[in-house]
Amino acid sequence: MLGDEETGIRAQLDTALEKLAQTQAQKRSNGEILDSLRQLSKISNSLEEMDRRIQTGNIEEAAQAVVALESVLESDYMLEDTRIKTVLRNRMAEARVNMRESTLDELRGFLVAESDADSAQIRVGAAGAQAVRQRAQSLLTAMDTLAVADEVRQALCTYVINTAIRPMLKARQVSRKEAADGSAAFEVRLSDAEEPSGSAEVCSVVLGAAEFVSGALGGNVKAELWTAEALAELAKLVLERCFLRCIPATRAELVEFRSEAEQMERFEKQLLGHSGPIFAATERLDELFIEQQSARALAQVRTLAEDVAFESRDLPAHEEWTVELLRALAETSGELAPLLAQAALAVEATKRVFPKCAVSASAHGLVATAYGLVNEAAQSGTAAQQLVRAARCLFDLHRALSVTLHHAQLRSTPALAWLFHNDCLYSAHHAAALGALSRHLLPADEAGIEGEAWQRTASQLVAAASALTEELLRTESAELQRISGDRRGFGSAAADGQRAVLAKTASRARLAVTQLCRAMRPPAVTPHVFYRALGRYIDAVFSATIGAVTDVPDISADDSQVLSEHCRNIHSLTALFRLDAELIEPYCTLQASSLVATGALPDQLLDSDAESESSGPELPSTDADPACRTKDSGSARLAHRYCLLSDKLIQLADILVISRADILARRRAGLLVQFTTDEVISLVRALFSDTPERARDIDELRRLG
């Protein structure tokens, strides 16, 4: 019985203790809830106070309130992981953004930038200068409290640079102007005079504007307002305005520019307190000068290559490579460098000569620009190879652009194609000379590499000239063959109307060849080039004529007479080889072989033997090279040399009117070697009736082979 009673008492005691614990826990919970409610009430009051301070413009106290509220939110564990805390955090972030933006807008509003044609100024807004400074300091202090002061300062400085300082530097000339109220405005006098302002004026304007803005907003230029990034941006403004845009074009100007650079370095140290981008640029002044020289030269050559005027200049005489010629070509870069003049003496001894012909103004400009760079290379020490390489690149650029940009014109206008041919050879001639010069300007290990590169450049120029003219010759020759090979007049040539058709064919061929001759008549090209191209054109006409005649299956006696006359009429095109003596005489004094031996010129412009066979009277022995003296001054020898089918056409004209026995006799004598056995047999069958005698003669022709 006693045991059961004890058990009941213990159960009652446990129940009472459990109820007591529950009561105490509920009391604690109620206390915590009450504390949280009090804290939320306090936060709510703080939010209302913060909003009121923001609305009244008391940004400094509002910033303190934001920081205090954020501290409360971070320390109150009762709000952890609650929606209330998330909402409050978002509210604080929004308040920060609004305060930062409103502060920045207000600071921007304190400064007014104005400009007209004569002046530009920065001035404090309508409020007094003292009030602005106090308000600005208050705003910046608030931003410091929010830990966003650097961000606001940088944004404000960027605004000032873009809206006030940059416009001041757009004019070519700037200078400080004393304002009526020096404490309330900073003014700059503007001018678009031809001579730009020196670095002293520009540095004074930038430094003065920075100091004014800093003073107007209550700070100083080094710390209170301008950030390190903004000050570096100001230094870059001066660098761009007074340095990068003003890098001199000549060595003489470079010496004067160094004093300007030193002045800019002093400005930079005053502005930043240490060296910065201006000092770094000054250290690279020589390198920048060389880079700009190269870039300027490339731009000039690109402009030359893009020129569509195709202005042509006939060389007044053969261009002999001398030191004086070098001096004239290099004058664009100033006085001829002593080292280059010394190297030129060695190159001059090789007797490099370019024959008289037409060369475009574009090619003249290219060559002069390249020599200017090489002249700079002779004065640049370790940078010589860079400039020599840049000069070589000019030739490659000009060649590539000319071929690409003027593709259609070069292939549709023969005169332009021959001008391009001359330009390429003229450029190759000077590229070879520049390559020889570079060997004297560069160290031995670099000279060999550059010498090979120059040789490749010259070879590519020669190849470009050959490729274009060969394409022109093929195209025009095909057209001449089409014109001359019109079969309509060759069959039954003696019939009514057929003579007129043949005469028209001959007339059209003559007109076409004559027009092509006009495009390349010396001195547009050298006589050798003229003869070589004319020979190709006339051979095309001869080939078509021979083919048309030999294709006629049956030729009567009357037809043969007409066709023979037509062949001789076509052969008279060889008279176009005749050139006036005054055109030929200057070329008789030049020996192509000697030029080639020096590596100065490919054997494409000159052939002294060809010039010697030109028309005109014999030159006196005292004035002409022995190779130029000839008693036979007719065009027949030139035609024989340059027209591969000249003899064949004349022989065809004879075959058409001579007897079968004469044909056989000439074949035996080896006078018809240009005709194959099948061609001769075909002509015999077309000209003569089928008889046993003809059959025997044909067998004999086969035996002769």
Image (tube, rainbow, N blue to C red):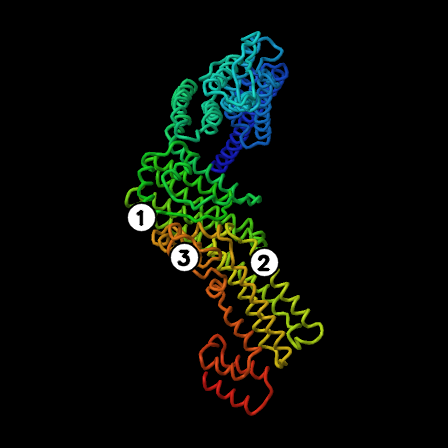
Say whether disc 2 or disc 3 marks the residue closer to the N-terminus: 2
Give the residue pinned by disc 2.
Answer: 514
Seen in the picture, residue 211 relative to 693 is either above or below; the reply is above
- Residue 647 or residue 702, whichever sits in front: 647
Say whether disc 1 or disc 2 marks the residue closer to the N-terminus: 1
- Residue 466 or residue 24, whichever sits in front: 466
- In the rendered image, residue 121, in percent from the top left (x then y), is placed at 57, 16
* Cα–Cα gap, marks 2 and 3: 28 Å
Amino acid type indicated by mark 3: Arg
Q: Residue furthest right?
A: 496
The reply to whether residue 72 is in sight is no
Seen in the picture, residue 272 relative to 218 is either above or below; the reply is below
- Residue 185 or residue 295, whichever sits in front: 295
* Mark 3, secondary structure of its residue: loop
Amino acid type indicated by mark 1: Gly
Pair 1/3: label in front: 3
Q: Quadrant of residue 107?
A: top right
- In the rendered image, residue 197, in percent from the top left (x then y), is placed at 49, 20
Give the residue pinned by disc 1.
Answer: 448
Give the residue pinned by disc 3.
Answer: 629
